[in-house]
């Protein structure tokens, strides 16, 4: 089970006659990679009670650095990817962030963007897919798209036709 | 000589008493759910006696970036503080490429913020850096009004940060002007896609604005609509009220706006006060295959679980009533990025270059809130 996010949320008092102070809660999103199910729980911070739990399917759960790390590991097991990255493949590190939520500058880093397909025959129509981007200093590795399908545990290397 | 000096002291004391009475006549600041750097309290003008005043909270969240949690506006020192925003944030940035693939959802990966430092946010332009990733700027905003020889320059408070979304940076900017106007903008910049650096694509930021004008109950939304009686010479303006949740397109010929009112909020002339959401497109507004991109405006009933623009169609199915209640506005802007040679080039297998910032956004503007133009003598 993974903790995806925990953040304080301010809910409005139900009655308009109450003071305008928000009711302090925490929103907690959890994700179980096996089975790809998630949950959003609403915790009342005053009473320390879980007030509401909503089931989420995998497509509704935001992706995190842990997904990126999984995607990178999948990519490193793909021969085509290793060929593209060359001898520097192992020098890339998953992009990290500071406690204040700021991206940490790194020389060789891998980041990702969530992709969804509009074609229902494409695995990424429903699967949790992340396109990887490899950065060296200021510049990004050009060439084919490397997409990690975290649901199917596969990597797709796609070359686009030049426009 | 002695009498003149006593008179001076008397008038000085009198002036001090009058000033302290005026100060005590100000409405006290409202309680806020934040403190420290996250609480922004800004009166205008920045020099001289206060005319208007903003008091708001900001926060940063991975993925959504910089958001506004509460915002109050006071239109004069003796007016009540007006509650305006409960929560204002970017809900999604959807980026489809022209060939149909890829289609990125840039808020659904919990991106960090870029570092922000003194070079991004120089003190010389009224900048203050918070936490190494947020910039506050307070400065001149150009002409507020001009009337022959009379003129007034306005001022504004800007909060901004930038999402580090792989090769993109998204600048998320919130502006609070001295005249009560709020502007939300997103700027797309940094690098073209290294896989498809020459493929045209669209960046579609979708904002979720939990507007609570004068508090959360009793709000309604009307569609500001201008109609020319072509081929005739006359024109009319209408404001049909939303009775139920809906999504609808923005028609530039109709000057559509989403006009929020609270049934108890009137100005000193007895007129219904409104805040109007006015699109500020740059070039146009896109349409794509996905249902949530096929409208520009959405009006929904408040529900804390409804935060994702991608699910908008399900939020309005079946449609709930939205008149005289707690409403949420959604607006989709678009940035059409047709890559240019200036954007960069491939050097030794790596994409090297930077794309200039391209903006889109909206204005949230008071209408009949003041009794007269603020900052006019």
Image (tube, helix red, strand yellow):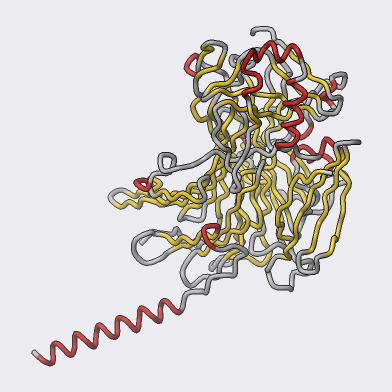
Q: Residue lying farthest top?
A: A162
Question: Which quadrant is the C terminus of chain B positioned in?
Answer: bottom left
Q: Nearer the viewer, residue B233 or B41?
A: B41
Q: Residue lying farthest bottom?
A: B3
Q: Residue at x 11, y 92 (%)?
A: B2
**Which quarter of the picture shows residue A88?**
top right
**Which quarter of the picture shows residue B237?**
top right
Left/right of residue A55 with respect to residue A109 in the rendered view: right
Q: Is residue A129 above or below residue B269?
A: above
Q: Nearer the viewer, residue B230 or B243?
A: B243
| Residue B132 shows in this picture | yes
Q: Is residue A76 above or below residue A61?
A: above
Q: Position of residue A6 (x, y in %)?
A: 73, 51
Q: Is residue B51 above or below residue B9?
A: above
Q: Nearer the viewer, residue B194 or B270?
A: B194
Q: Residue at x 61, y 15 (%)?
A: A142
Q: Residue lying farthest right?
A: A35
Q: Position of residue A24 (x, y in %)?
A: 72, 64
Q: Residue lying farthest left?
A: B1
Q: Position of residue B144 (x, y in %)?
A: 40, 50
Left/right of residue B49 with respect to residue B202 in the rendered view: left
Question: Which quadrant is the N terminus of chain B positioned in?
Answer: bottom left
**Which quarter of the picture shows residue A63?**
top right
Q: Is residue B98 above or below residue B95?
A: above
Q: Position of residue A101 (x, y in %)?
A: 61, 45
Q: Residue at x 60, y 52 (%)?
A: B59
């Amino acid at each position: 089970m993974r903790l995806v996010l925990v953040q304080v949320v301010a809910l409005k008092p139900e009655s308009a006659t109450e003071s305008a102070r928000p009711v302090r809660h925490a929103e907690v999103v959890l994700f179980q990679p096996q089975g790809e199910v998630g949950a959003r729980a609403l915790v009342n911070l005053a009473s320390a009670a879980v007030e509401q739990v909503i089931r989420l399917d995998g497509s509704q759960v935001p992706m995190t650095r842990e997904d990126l790390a999984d995607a990178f590991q999948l990519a490193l097991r793909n021969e085509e990817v290793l060929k593209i990255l060359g001898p520097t493949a192992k020098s890339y590190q998953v992009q990290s962030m500071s406690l204040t939520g700021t991206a940490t500058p790194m020389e060789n880093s891998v980041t990702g963007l969530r992709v969804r397909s509009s074609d229902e025959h494409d695995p990424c129509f429903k699967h949790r897919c992340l396109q990887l981007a490899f950065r060296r200093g200021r510049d990004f590795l050009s060439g084919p798209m490397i997409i990690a399908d975290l649901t199917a545990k596969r990597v797709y290397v796609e070359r686009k036709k030049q426009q | 000589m002695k009498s003149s000096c006593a008179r001076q002291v008397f008038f000085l004391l009198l002036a001090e008493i009058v000033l302290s009475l005026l100060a005590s006549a100000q409405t006290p600041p409202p309680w806020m759910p934040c403190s420290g750097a996250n609480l922004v309290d800004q009166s205008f003008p920045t020099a001289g006696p206060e005319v208007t005043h903003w008091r708001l909270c900001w926060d940063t969240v991975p993925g959504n970036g910089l958001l506004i949690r509460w915002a109050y506006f006071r239109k004069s020192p003796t007016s009540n503080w007006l509650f305006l925003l409960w929560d204002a944030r970017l809900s999604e940035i959807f980026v489809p490429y022209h060939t149909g693939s890829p289609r990125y959802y840039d808020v659904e990966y919990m991106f960090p913020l870029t570092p922000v430092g003194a070079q991004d946010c120089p003190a010389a332009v009224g900048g203050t850096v918070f936490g190494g990733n947020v910039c506050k700027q307070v400065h001149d905003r150009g002409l507020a009004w001009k009337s022959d020889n009379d003129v007034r320059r306005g001022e504004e408070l800007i909060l901004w940060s930038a999402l580090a979304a792989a090769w993109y940076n998204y600048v998320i900017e919130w502006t609070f002007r001295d005249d009560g106007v709020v502007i939300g903008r997103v700027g797309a910049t940094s690098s073209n896609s290294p896989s498809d650096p020459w493929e045209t694509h669209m960046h579609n930021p979708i904002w979720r604005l939990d507007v609570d004008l004068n508090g959360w109950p009793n709000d309604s939304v009307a569609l500001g609509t201008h109609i020319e009686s072509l081929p005739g010479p006359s024109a009319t303006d209408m404001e049909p009220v939303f009775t139920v949740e809906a999504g609808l397109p923005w028609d530039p010929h109709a000057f559509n706006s989403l006009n929020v009112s609270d049934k108890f909020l009137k100005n000193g002339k007895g007129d219904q006060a409104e805040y109007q959401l006015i699109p500020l497109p740059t070039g146009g507004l896109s349409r794509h295959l996905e249902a949530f991109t096929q409208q520009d405006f959405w009006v929904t009933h408040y529900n804390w679980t409804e935060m994702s623009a991608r699910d908008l169609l399900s939020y309005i199915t079946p449609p709930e009533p939205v008149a005289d209640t707690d409403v949420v506005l959604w607006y989709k802007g678009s940035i059409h990025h047709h890559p240019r040679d200036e954007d960069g080039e491939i050097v030794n297998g790596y994409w090297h270059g930077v794309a200039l910032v391209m903006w889109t956004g909206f204005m949230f503007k008071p209408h009949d809130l003041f009794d007269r133009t603020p900052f006019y003598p």
